[in-house]
Amino acid sequence: MNKIISLFIFVIAASYANADDKPILVDVDWLKSNFNDPKVVVLQVSFLKFDYDREHIEGSRYLWPGWLGPDSPEGALNVPELDKATVVLQELGINNDSHIILCHIRNEVSSTARIFLTLEHLGLRGKVSFLNGGLEQWKKAGNPVTTQVPSVKRGNVKIKAGDLIVNKDYVLKTLKSSDAFVVDARATRFYDGEPTGNPRDGHITGAKNIPFMDLVDANNLYKPLPELQNYFTPVASKDKELVVYCFIGQTASVVYMAGRLLGYNVKLYDGSMQEWSRIDSLPMEKTEKNP
């Protein structure tokens, strides 16, 4: 009985602790209704600034993914250095009380989801939202775009390193745990073992599979929560931690976001198959096919 009461108190306390958190997903109607809120900062994420220069939501700023996910000789999409990330975010006008809205273009959901994850990892969890459908949905709803670049006052945001992005040792520990699961976010054919160009094919031994592309629809919108849950239920209950990976740590961010929407505790293995497949001592397997 005491355990039940303690759990109830914990849940109530947690709900109050998270009461000020911003929604993970917002739609274009929400953005339109909150457009004039001075704390709302829209960041358009795209690989080429050309796309931002051609059209963007009025007042939005351009964020190149490489600024917060730099490549290095050790691998692609690394966690940024804190001092450099601080400069990037402050120059974009981000303050400690800002509500960041990430806007993708066309089908660039995964690169923008990676920025969402990175910002949460850097201590901004509860302050970042993802515009569902991105710029295309904004335009489809009849809302205007512009080429005008806003004048931005330097922000005062402070960041810190979190624990959402993990390494191979953490994955190895997870494989031995009954309280956590490893999830491969790649297409099932690559999970099964179709050649990819990596030194070894297949998946991390014991990993489950939630293909990232199944979580969004043809309009690059996240599917409704009940549909998302159908992909997660066969993998683990919500009391289990999930560690997701993919090729380089980008597309798995789509699964990370879906897990967050559903209330799962999710982390990302940043090295993913780019690293894991190159270390022969790390366990891998292919899916056994019925004859």
Image (cartoon, helix red, strand yellow):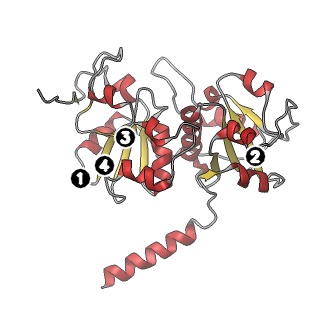
User: On the image, numbered disc 4 is attached to which residue?
Assistant: 235
Given the image, on which type of amino acid does mark 2 rest? Answer: Val
Of the residues under marks 3 and 2, which one precedes in the sequence? 2
Q: Is residue 86 above or below residue 227?
A: above
Q: Secondary structure at mark 2?
A: strand
User: On the image, numbered disc 3 is attached to which residue?
Assistant: 210
Of the residues under marks 1 and 2, which one precedes in the sequence? 2
Q: Residues within 10 Å of mark 2 (few under 14, many from 20)?
A: many
Disc nearest the viewer among 4 and 1: 4
User: On the image, numbered disc 2 is attached to which residue?
Assistant: 41
The Cα atoms of the two marked residues, 4 and 2, are separated by 36 Å
Percent across and percent down for residue 138 are: 73, 42
The Cα atoms of the two marked residues, 4 and 1, are separated by 13 Å
Disc nearest the viewer among 3 and 1: 3
77 left or right of 97 in image: left
Looking at the image, which is closer to me, 62 or 278? Answer: 62
Is residue 249 visible in this depiction of the protein? Answer: yes
Is residue 98 visible in this depiction of the protein? Answer: no
Q: Residue at x 32, y 27 (%)?
A: 189
The Cα atoms of the two marked residues, 3 and 4, are separated by 8 Å
Marks 4/1 in contact by CB < 8 Å: the verdict is: no
The Cα atoms of the two marked residues, 3 and 1, are separated by 19 Å
Q: Residue at x 79, y 25 (%)?
A: 54
Given the image, on which type of amino acid does mark 3 rest? Answer: Ile
